[in-house]
Image (tube, grey):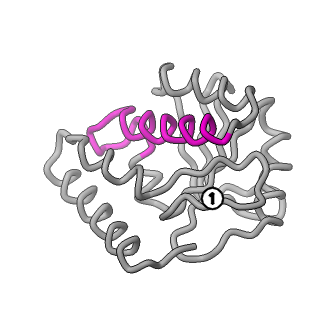
Amino acid sequence: TKVVAWLLAPQGNHGSGQKPLRTFLSLAWKTARERDEQEKHLDALSKAKVGDLSGVRVCTERVAGDRRSDLVLEDDRRQLFVVIENKIKAGHHQGKLDDYREWAQTQSEIPLLILLSPLNRVTGCDDVISVAYRDWIPRINRLDAKSERCNILRNQFTSNMERIMGTGEEN
């Protein structure tokens, strides 16, 4: 989760600026559109994927009611508020997602709840947008960071995720 937060942070020292976040939000928009998601979610994602994302803050382990969310993205203009549940091996729990949705609605008019998982499988989860590592990883690999150290870290992360996905381990 910390590496995902690092990649999504536009101010991160990864040297790719807003590109990883924009790529992630574009995938979320694509998934939402394919699922005929509510218009308000598509509008929020459309604005986010083309707008200025430099003010987006990425928080990990943010307290969300009685729970801790894996990742929260929010901008200083309060136009974007995204709760990301990062599930690599463990299954998602509907009650947990419902709690996050309820909490997020107190934080923003149009909160987005995204499940990041290896193979993009969300069942029985209304309003949850799914983003698959298998779709995001190849796009991240095409980004070139300014620092060789950052490229190495990104490559190690994507290699580990590809190994996990290749073994059939699923949430």
- Magenta span: 8-35
48 and 129: which is toward the camera = 129
Q: What is the x, y in percent for residue 103?
A: 82, 49
Q: Quadrant of the C terminus?
A: bottom right
104 and 131: which is toward the camera = 131
- What amino acid type should be assigned to the residue bearing mark 1? Glu
Left or right: 117, with 85 as reference point:
left
Left or right: 12, with 46 as reference point:
left
27 and 71: which is toward the camera = 27
Provide the major secondary structure of the magenta segment: helix
Q: What is the x, y in percent for residue 37?
A: 71, 37
- Residue at the (32%, 45%) spot, across then down: 139
Q: What is the x, y in percent for residue 35?
A: 66, 42
Residue holding disc 1? 85
Helix, strand or loop for disc 1:
strand
Above or below: residue 112 compared with residue 84: above
Residue 61 shown in magenta? no
Q: What is the x, y in percent for residue 105?
A: 83, 40
Number of marks drawn: 1
Above or below: residue 42 compared with residue 23: above
**What crowding class fits label 1: few (fewer than 14 Cα within 10 Å), some (14-19), or many (20 or more)?**
many
Q: Quadrant of residue 31?
A: top right
- Residue at the (21%, 42%) spot, across then down: 145
- Residue at the (55%, 26%) spot, across then down: 48
Q: Residue furthest left?
A: 148
Above or below: residue 65 compared with residue 79: below
15 and 32: which is toward the camera = 32
- Residue at the (76%, 56%) spot, across then down: 125
Q: Quadrant of residue 155?
A: bottom left
Residue 10 shown in magenta? yes
